[in-house]
Image: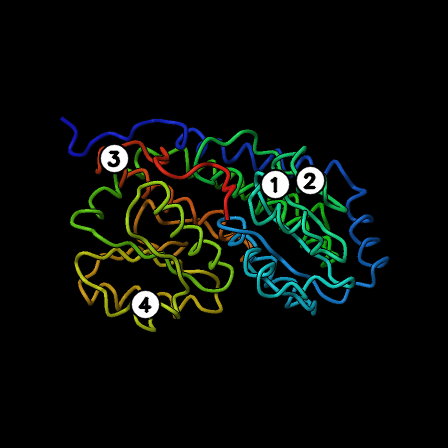
């Protein structure tokens, strides 16, 4: 008899296993549209862009962290804000000299539809969506379509495809060689594929880590904030369990006191700028007798050890152990991960 309940192999798992294909199709589609570079640059020049607003909700919002860092480091005046906060509290962000980059997998999220339909936007819009005939795609000055295909429940393959499209857009803004960008994205897709080829072993190795766990945290810094935010979100959404995603620094400002045998801290090692700080948090969590997992190239856990990759692409790999953890936890709880009881795929109500 197996030691733990088996994973129910439903739609969420199928979508997870399709992630490498979604990433490759998205990259190939963007590479086959060389006019996008000229279109993006022309859009910015024509409207004398002074500011870039990056917006979305849920996983689509968290996916914007790497682009926000890259654009800001390159000298662009860049603001990242949830669409709901922008439209209700800071609508003046959308001036005629503002370029808005909006991300929505469905292109029909309630806040995105309000943004597009209530005359908030005064400047141009670049839409990132998985749905070609959506409100977002039809309303955008320029659309970057992901090629994830239909997704049944929790954001996974659309999230990775969205990260791929946003990385491509960043390469255009930063005047990077797109052939090299395509190569890096293909290598990331191959790394995802290699990791997922051992999904059963990964889930089995994570089952022990969940014994007695009542609360899960996912933390990171820099580019890994995308993983922290999305990781905390999909754990709640796919397993209906208490989880939270936040920066490793924010975790020290209060939540650190929660560390105990009932808490699992999933800590992204991240890039070299703050890896030592994240490792220190991991070591302190262990000393506090909490369960702790270090996610990254320096991990000693087989399900959390990842290959090295360029820092902006880290979230594409870091989310994989969290996905495996969600499948393992749902199996322990006796239900199918990602099988919605109250939520829906498209959030159509504010």
Q: CA distance from mark 1 to mark 2?
A: 7 Å
Q: CA distance from mark 4 to mark 3?
A: 29 Å
Q: Foreground mark, 4 or 2?
A: 2
Residue topped by disc 2: 137
* Secondary structure found at label 1: loop
Label 4 crowding class (10 Å Cα cut-off): few <14, some 14-19, many 20+? many
User: Which residue is nearer to you in this view: 83 or 36?
Assistant: 83
Which image quarter is the N terminus in? top left
Label 2 crowding class (10 Å Cα cut-off): few <14, some 14-19, many 20+? many
Q: Are marks 4 and 3 in contact (CB under 8 Å)?
A: no
Residue 295, position as x, y percentages in the image: 37, 54
* Residue 262 left/right relative to 78: left
Q: CA distance from mark 1 to mark 3?
A: 32 Å
Q: Is residue 225 above or below residue 182?
A: below
Q: Earlier in the sequence, mark 1 or mark 3?
A: 1
Residue topped by disc 3: 331
What label does residue 281 carry, if any? 4
Q: Foreground mark, 2 or 3?
A: 2
Q: Earlier in the sequence, mark 2 or mark 3?
A: 2
Q: CA distance from mark 2 to mark 3?
A: 37 Å
Q: CA distance from mark 4 to mark 2?
A: 42 Å
Where, by quadrant of the figure, is residue 197 drawn?
A: top left
What label does residue 107 carry, if any? 1
Q: Are marks 1 and 2 in contact (CB under 8 Å)?
A: yes
User: Which residue is nearer to you in this view: 114 or 307?
Assistant: 114
Q: Earlier in the sequence, mark 1 or mark 2?
A: 1
């Amino acid at each position: 008899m197996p030691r733990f309940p088996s994973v129910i192999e439903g739609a969420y798992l199928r979508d997870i296993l399709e992630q490498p294909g979604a990433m490759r199709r998205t990259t190939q589609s963007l590479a086959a549209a060389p006019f996008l570079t000229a279109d993006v640059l022309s859009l910015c020049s024509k409207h004398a862009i002074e500011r870039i607003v990056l917006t979305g909700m849920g996983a689509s919002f968290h996916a914007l962290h790497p682009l926000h860092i890259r654009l800001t480091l390159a000298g662009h005046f860049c603001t990242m804000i949830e669409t709901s906060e922008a439209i209700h509290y800071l609508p003046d962000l959308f001036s005629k000299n503002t370029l808005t980059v909006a991300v929505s997998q469905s292109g029909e999220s309630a806040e995105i539809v309000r943004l597009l339909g209530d005359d908030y936007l005064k400047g141009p819009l670049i839409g990132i969506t998985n749905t070609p005939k959506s409100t977002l795609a039809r309303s955008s000055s320029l659309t970057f379509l992901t090629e994830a295909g239909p997704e049944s429940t929790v954001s996974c393959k659309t999230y990775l495809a969205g990260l791929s499209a946003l990385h491509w857009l960043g390469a255009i803004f930063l005047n990077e060689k797109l052939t090299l960008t395509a190569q890096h994205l293909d290598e990331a897709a191959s790394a995802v594929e290699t990791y997922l080829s051992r999904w059963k072993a990964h889930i089995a190795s994570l089952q022990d880590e969940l014994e007695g766990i009542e609360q899960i945290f996912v933390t990171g810094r820099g580019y890994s904030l995308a993983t922290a935010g999305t990781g905390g979100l999909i754990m709640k959404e796919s397993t209906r369990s208490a989880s939270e995603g936040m920066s490793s620094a924010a975790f020290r400002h209060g939540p650190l006191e929660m560390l105990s045998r009932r808490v699992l801290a999933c800590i992204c090692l991240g890039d070299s700028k703050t890896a030592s700080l994240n490792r220190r948090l991991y070591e302190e969590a262990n000393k506090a007798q909490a369960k702790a997992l270090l996610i990254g190239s320096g991990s000693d856990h087989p399900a959390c050890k990842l290959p090295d990759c360029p820092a902006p692409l880290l979230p594409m790999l870091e989310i994989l152990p969290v996905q495996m953890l969600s499948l393992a936890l749902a199996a322990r709880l006796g239900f199918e991960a990602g099988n919605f009881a109250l939520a829906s795929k498209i959030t159509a109500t504010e």
